Amino acid sequence: MKIVKKVQRKLLKNSRECDAFEYGLGCDSLVGVVVEVRGRHPEKGRVANLEREGRAYIRERVR
């Protein structure tokens, strides 16, 4: 198990409605991701990550 602190995460702004916080696990092909979606993302169609194998936890941000 690898512990990654919140200050070590990397923010990826996918769109106005979607932020992804990437937690590096010491391997370029595998990352942990927390995704915050506010509304529809993407506006049309679907999203697929073709660059890496990842595990995502998706949560809705309430403001």
Image: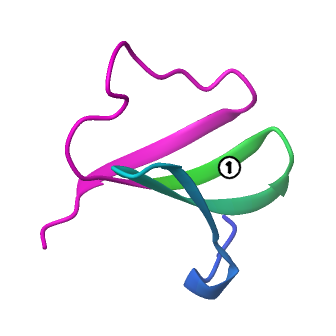
Q: How many marks?
A: 1
Q: What's drawn in magenta, residue-wise?
A: 35-63
Q: Residue at x 32, y 27 (%)?
A: 43
Relative image position of residue 20 (x, y in whole percent): 50, 55
Residue 17 lies left or right of residue 49; in this view the side is left
The answer to whether residue 47 is magenta is yes
> Label 1 sits on what residue type?
Val
The answer to whether residue 51 is magenta is yes
Q: Quadrant of residue 9?
A: bottom right
Relative image position of residue 29 (x, y in whole percent): 81, 38
Q: Residue at x 39, y 52 (%)?
A: 16
Residue tagged 1: 31
Residue 34 lies left or right of residue 22; in this view the side is left
Residue 52's place in the image compared with 4, above or below, is above
Which sits in the foreground, 33 or 63? 63
Relative image position of residue 52 (x, y in whole percent): 73, 32
Q: Is disc 1 placed on a helix, strand or loop?
A: strand
Q: Quadrant of the N terminus?
A: bottom right
Q: Residue at x 64, y 63 (%)?
A: 23
How would you classify the magenta stretch by its main secondary structure?
loop
Residue 58's place in the image compared with 49, above or below, is below
Residue 8's place in the image compared with 16, above or below, is below
